[in-house]
Image: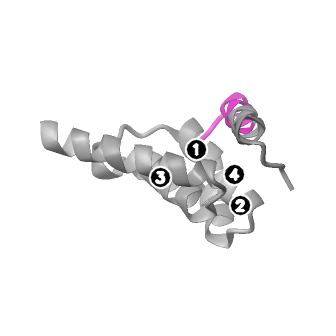
Amino acid sequence: MGNSLKSATFLIETRLEDAARGDCSACYDLGILYSTGAAGVEIDLIEAHKWFNLAAVAGNEAAQQCRADISEDMTAREIAEAQKQARAFLQLTGRRAA
């Protein structure tokens, strides 16, 4: 159990670094992790929506579909929070929303 948590943490940290550099596939991967609970990550639809949104803004069509799919299981408030977090990430990394 400890090893899978450690590998999940490493995977997330690595993909976060890539996402901060503008890698939209890293954003998509993070969305998958948080929406499915892969690699022992706790499912977090707000976090997943945020990452799918960031990938979708960069033109990733699969992320657009995933974002739409999980939106059906989220409240308007949760979606608004995810969008707020996505904007904050873009500001933090100096990237612009489309």
Residue 15 got which mark? 3
Q: Is residue 85 visible?
A: yes
Q: Which secondary structure is most common in the magenta stretch?
A: helix
Give coordinates of residue 47: x percent, y percent. Answer: 56, 39
Give coordinates of residue 9: x percent, y percent. Answer: 33, 40
Query: Disc 2 designates what residue?
Result: 56
Could you say which is closer to the camera, residue 12 or residue 52? Answer: 12
Residue 85 got which mark? none
Q: Quadrant of the C terminus?
A: bottom right
Q: Secondary structure at mark 1?
A: loop
Q: Amino acid at mark 4?
A: Asn
Q: Amino acid at mark 3?
A: Arg
Q: Is residue 35 above or below residue 87?
A: below
* Label 2, residues with CA under 10 Å away: few <14, some 14-19, many ≥20: many
Horizontal arrangement in the rendering, residue 83 relative to residue 69 (left or right): right
Q: Sequence-wise, which precedes: disc 2 or disc 1?
A: 2
Are the residues at dot 2 and dot 4 in contact (C-beta closer than 8 Å)? yes
Query: Disc 4 designates what residue?
Result: 53
Q: Quadrant of the N terminus?
A: top left
Q: Is residue 89 magenta?
A: no
Q: Sequence-wise, which precedes: disc 1 or disc 4?
A: 4
* Label 1, residues with CA under 10 Å away: few <14, some 14-19, many ≥20: few
Q: Sequence-wise, which precedes: disc 3 or disc 1?
A: 3
Query: Disc 1 designates what residue?
Result: 73
Give coordinates of residue 48: x percent, y percent. Answer: 55, 45
Horizontal arrangement in the rendering, residue 63 relative to residue 76 (left or right): left
Q: Sequence-wise, which precedes: disc 3 or disc 4?
A: 3
Q: CA distance from mark 2 to mark 1?
A: 18 Å
- Specify the farthest residue to the bottom: 61
Q: CA distance from mark 2 to mark 4?
A: 5 Å
